[in-house]
Amino acid sequence: MKYISLEDNRMFENIKNSGQYGQMYIQFSANWCGPCKMITPKIKELVNTTQNDKAIYCYCDVDEYDELASQLNITSIPTFVIYNIATGQFSDKLTSSNYEDIKNYFSL
């Protein structure tokens, strides 16, 4: 699975409209967040070893790109959501830094 940093709405729209992916797995985090710093390398390693060409993993730093976080009312980090590109729907949010919870949430 591809891992990218989601930087702005244009990038979000480009991924959404590319036709290449069915789902976007999105992590909302920040560089100053202790639990985020702890879990991000583990999740990145998991994503990089997962074979799934129909999904893309997007890391979203809420200090750099807050528009999507605001739209989804993200108030705590790290928070994870799944965006189904075909339906345009976001899943229920998971706010956690527990590796197993996140792995199960994304079914990885």
Image (spheres, rainbow, N blue to C red):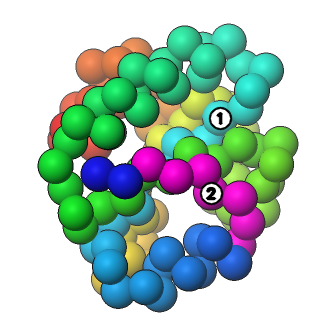
Left or right: residue 52 versus residue 38 is: left
The residue at the far right in this view is: 63
Q: Can residue 46 be seen in this view?
A: yes
Q: Does the residue at mark 2 contact the one at mark 1 (Cβ under 8 Å)?
A: no
Residue at x-position 59% and y-position 71%? 12
Q: Can residue 70 be seen in this view?
A: no
**Reading the chain from its start, which is encountered first: label 2 or label 1?**
2
The residue sitting at 24% across, 67% down in the picture is: 54
Helix, strand, or loop for circle 2? loop
Quarter residue 87 falls in: bottom left
Residue 67 sits above or below residue 51 on the image:
below
In the depicted structure, whether residue 21 falls above or below residue 80? below
Image point 61% across, 18% down: which residue? 37
Residue 77 in percent (x, y) is at 64, 30
State which quarter of the image contains the C terminus.
top left
* Stretch in magenta: 3-9
Left or right: residue 86 compared with residue 93: left
- Disc 2 crowd rating (10 Å Cα; few below 14, some 14-19, many 20+) is many
Q: Is residue 24 above or below residue 25?
A: below
Q: Which mark is residue 29?
A: 1
Hey, what amino acid is under mark 2? Answer: Leu
Q: Is residue 5 magenta?
A: yes
- Label 1 sits on a secondary structure element that is strand
Q: Dot 2 corresponds to which residue?
A: 6
Numbered label attached to residue 71: none
Residue 14 is covered by the magenta coloring: no
Question: Residue 90's image quarter?
Answer: bottom left
Residue 86 falls in image quadrant: bottom left
Q: Position of residue 32 (x, y in %)?
A: 79, 21
Amino acid, disc 1: Ser
